[in-house]
Image (spheres, rainbow, N blue to C red):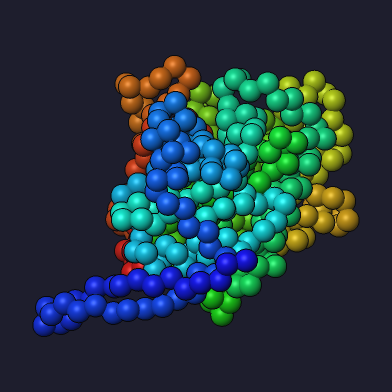
Amino acid sequence: MTCFSFLFRRRNDSVNNQTFEVDEEFDVQNVKFYSYKELRTATEDFSPVNKIGEGGFGSVYKGRLKNGNIAAIKVLSAESRQGVREFVTEIKVISEIEHENLVKLYGCCVEDNHRILVYNYLENNSLSQTLLGSGHSNIQFNWRTRSKICIGIARGLAFLHEEVRPYIVHRDIKASNILLDKDLTPKISDFGLAKLIPANLTHVSTRVAGTIGYLAPEYAIRGQLTRKADIYGFGVLLIEIVTGRCNTNTRLPVGEQYLLERTWDLYEKRELVGLVDELLNGDFDAEEACRYLKIGLLCTQDAPKLRPSMSSVVKMLTGQKMVDERKITKPGLISDFMDLKVRSSDKTKPGQKNTSYNAFSGSDKGNSTISSGTSTSANTTFNTMNNDDRSV
Ligand SMILES: Nc1ncnc2c1ncn2[C@@H]1O[C@H](COP(=O)(O)OP(=O)(O)OP(=O)(O)O)[C@@H](O)[C@H]1O
Ligand SMILES: [Mg+2]
């Protein structure tokens, strides 16, 4: 194993505008650095042919590294660029995390202005493109497979929340951040947003970055970020996996557009089984599927402290722990707090909806803006800035 220190120079401007340089040494043991040249060769000069996706932080390319490994190479956009020190510090944390249900980060490139992440490539794409996509996938998501995926995601998140020290809040649990390997083992991806939370802090108010529909109300509105916000996102995802439906679908009749609201309605009517994905053709364990939906409801309760920990969720999913129905209270729905205006753009591709959201919460008096780029009706990324946000 190579052990070396990374030496870099930082320019500091003093109050009287004199510029000086500070040499700092910090430990980057276990971090693999790739040269820009190697990544350029791997992706055939970042050819569009090798581009496999684009997210809020930049483009992702498939490429073959010098050692023969196939990698997903994520080129961060200019806005996502941090200073070398911050970037490498985060990379070091991520590089050291290994779990069967987390995407492995091979290393990074920090040459000049380039900030590139190199991940293990997963063959079967993301849940948003396969299970929830528009039908181009030939993967059969039978009940066993879905159950294995739910348990795997829960285990990966429980590891981040309860075993990594200090623990990690993912911040962006959603279907496009769940990748599937060749055996359909789920891997949680995208630690780009993950930040370490010091153990003595109960919550951190910071810039909200996530996807509408997966966002816990307290995070979306007040920027309160705790593990319970991830658990909310997991609950939404769990319900999506069982039902095969996106959390939001504005093409459905009013009253059915928001999956979580619909799940609560059917739970109250004791008709949850009717929500299970029709594509399963009735070939599923009804008791288990309804249990999973109830666990989804437990995770999305309005009061964060009522949501179970991820290790409890794993136990409930695997049947080691009972789901206490008396404990299920109404889900927290950000639409209850916000005046959400949905506008459809004319430039919409067939089957897609370019949606923008304006949200005004009572406490923010219109200072929170939510804006999105092109997205499916159920997959809209937005950023919210709170008034008291000092961390950006
Ligand atoms: N390790 C990987 N292996 C295979 N495909 C990947 C990998 N990482 C990303 N991708 C592909 O690239 C796409 C874009 O990923 P990216 O994380 O940049 O955006 P996103 O998850 O869709 O949105 P966001 O930026 O909000 O996270 C993914 O949906 C997936 O199809
Ligand atoms: Mg992603």
Which residue lies at the image location 31% right of the left edge and 54% below the top edge?
113
- Percent position of residue 171, x then y: 53, 56
Q: On screen, 311 above or below 3? A: above
Nearer the observer, 317 or 323: 317
Q: How many marks?
A: 0
Q: On screen, 217 above or below 276? A: below
Q: In the image, is 194 to the left or to the right of 312?
A: left
- Percent position of residue 332, x then y: 57, 52
- Percent position of residue 196, x then y: 53, 68
Nearer the observer, 168 or 305: 168
User: Is residue 188 something one can see in this rendering?
Assistant: no
Q: In the image, is 299 to the left or to the right of 114?
A: right
User: Is residue 104 something one can see in this rendering?
Assistant: yes
Which residue lies at the image location 51% right of the left edge and 23% below the top edge?
251
Nearer the observer, 3 or 181: 3
Question: Residue pushed farthest top?
Answer: 350
Q: In the image, is 109 to the left or to the right of 228?
A: left
Which residue lies at the image location 69% right of the left edge and 43% below the top edge?
186
Q: On screen, 98 above or below 255? A: below
Quarter occupied by residue 275: top right
- Percent position of residue 168, x then y: 58, 64
Which residue lies at the image location 53% right of the left edge and 63% below the top edge?
31
Check the picture and name the quadrant holding the N terminus.
Answer: bottom right
Check the picture and name the quadrant holding the C terminus.
Answer: bottom left
